[in-house]
Image (cartoon, rainbow, N blue to C red):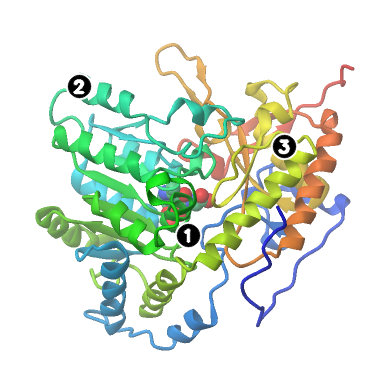
Amino acid sequence: MRPMPEPFRIKMVEPLYPSTREQRKRWLEAAGYNLFNLHATQVYIDLLTDSGTGAMSDRQWSMLLRGDESYAGAESFYRLAKTVDDVFGFTQFVPTHQGRASEALLFGVMVKPAQIVPNNTHFDTTRANLEMAGACAVDLPIPEARDTASEHPFKGNIDIERLEKLLEDTTPGRVPLGMLTLTNNSVGGQPVSLENIEQTKLLLAKYDVPLFLDACRFAENAWFIHRREPDWKDKPLEEIVRTAFSFADGFTFSAKKDGLANIGGLLGVRDKSVFEQIKQRMVVTEGFPTYGGLAGRDLEAIAQGLTEVLDPAHLAHRVGQAVSMVEQLDGAGVPVLKPAGGHGVFLDARRFLPRIPLEEFPGQALAAALYLETGVRSCEIGSVMFAKRDKDTGEMRFPDLDLVRLAIPRRVYTNAQLAWVAEGIADLYAQRDHITGMRMVEEPPVLRHFSARFAPIFRAVIQ
Ligand code: F0G
C-alpha cells in the first residue's frame, strides 16, 4: 500500500543527531547495553516509545498560553472537564501527572492484598502497581495473540472463556475489578473489538465486578473498530469511543499517548464513594483534584489534544505508517508481528534470532544490535520486561513472546524516515548470524528493564 502523505505541514523543526558506528559502540557499552541508559543525543531516530514524545499542534501550543495556574478551580480544569465529558461521557474524573499515577491511585483505593485483577494483558506499570498493592495481575489474551503470524483482526481481545473460568473459580470479593487495555500494548498494539468490550462488561457485571479501561490508546483502538468490526464499520469514531466507554465503570488514561500531550493522565470513575476516596488520597501524592500534579497549561494541552486525536486523517496516517513499515519488512522476509499494531511495529525476536536461547534475551540482543548498526532506538518487550523466576521451583518463566517494539511517536517522523528505518532492519536481518546473546549483569528488583545492565556473550559462530 502506498503510504498516505503526512496530513500536516511542518512549522518548526529540531535537529537529528547522526553518529558513527564507532561512537555508538562506545555509548552502548557505557549504557550497559540498555537503551534506556543512552543520552537522547546519542540516538538518531528514537522509537523507544510513543509516550509523551509526540509533536503538539499549533493549536495546542496556543492553548498553553491560556493555562490558568490557579491552585484550585482553574478555568483550564473546567475546559478539560467539558472535553472529557464530550469524548468519554464521564463527569467524574481527576487529572494526574501520568497514567501510572492514575493506576496507583485507583488500586490504592480499590485493591487489597491477595486480590486478583484480570486484564487482556497488563502493561508493565499496571502490573507493577498491582503487585505493589499485594495483588495478583492475571493476563488473559486470546490464543491468537501468541502467534505473531496470525492475522486475527482483534488480537488484543481478552479470552472471555478464561475470564469466565477465573470468575467462577474465585471466591466472591476476590476480584475487585477487571481491566481491558486499549490497544493491547504488550501483545503488539493490537485492538480490542467493541463486541469483546461489551461481552467483558456483561460477564463482569454477572459477578458484580466493575470494568475499568486502560484507555491510553483509545483513539487508535476506535480506528481499528471503525475499519474492521462489521457492526461498526465506517461509523463515526466519536460514537465508537462513547459506546466503548459506556460499558466502563471507570478508566485510567495516559495523556502522553492519545491525549497528544507530552505529560499528563486522567482517572475516571462512576462510583461516587470511590471517587471521593480518590480525591482525598490524591491531595497527599498528586495534588489538588482540579490540577492533579499538572500545570494549568498541561490541562489545556490535553483538552485540545483530545479534540484532535479522533481526526480520521490523523489516525489513517498514523496507523498507515505502521502498516507501511510492516509491509516493507514482511517483503524483506523479516519476522514481524502481523497485522500491524496501532502505535508501532513489533519484531519477533525469537524468529529473528532463533540461535539465541531465551536465557540470553534475544529481544535485548536485537534492540542493541539495531542501535549499533543504525542509531535507531527501540524497546524490548519480552523476557527482560516480563520473565520471572518461580518462587517455589526457582525455574525461569518466560513470557509468550520476545518482541522488539519500534514505537512511532505521533506526528514526529515522516514516512521517508520510517522507510529508512525499515531498510536498516532488513539489512540487519541479512547479517543476523553475527548478533550475540546478552547476559544480565545488574538486575534491579522492580521494573528491571528500565535500569538493568547487560554484557554481550561472545562465542564462536557455528556455521
Ligand atoms: N498503560 C499502557 C497500556 C501503557 O502503554 C502505559 C505506558 C501506561 C499504562 C502507563 O502510562 O507512562 O503515562 O505512566 N506506556 C509507555 C510505553 C511507557 O512506552 O508503552 P504512563
Foreground of the two, 202 or 29:
202
The structure residue drawn at horizontal position 47% and vertical position 62%, both measured from the top left corner, is: 256
Q: Nearer the viewer, mark 3 or mark 2?
A: 2
Judged from the image, the secondary structure of the residue bearing numbered disc 2 is helix
Q: Which mark is residue 347?
A: none
Q: Position of residue 271 (x, y in %)?
A: 13, 53
Which residue position holds label 3?
366
Q: Is residue 94 left or right of residue 450?
A: left
The structure residue drawn at horizontal position 72% and vertical position 23%, both measured from the top left corner, is: 356
Q: Is residue 67 visible?
A: yes
Q: Decide which of tag 3 and tag 2 comes sooner along the chain.
A: 2
Foreground of the two, 445 or 52:
52
Judged from the image, the secondary structure of the residue bearing numbered disc 3 is helix
Q: Position of residue 230 (x, y in %)?
A: 42, 45
Q: Position of residue 239 (x, y in %)?
A: 33, 61
Q: Is residue 392 left or right of residue 318?
A: left
The structure residue drawn at horizontal position 17% and vertical position 56%, both measured from the top left corner, is: 270
Disc 3 residue type (three-letter): Leu
Q: Decide which of tag 3 and tag 1 comes sooner along the chain.
A: 1
Q: Nearer the viewer, mark 3 or mark 1?
A: 1
Q: Label 3 to label 2, Cα distance in Å? A: 41 Å
In the image, residue 235 sits, relative to residue 402, either above or below, namely below
Q: Which mark is residue 168?
A: 2
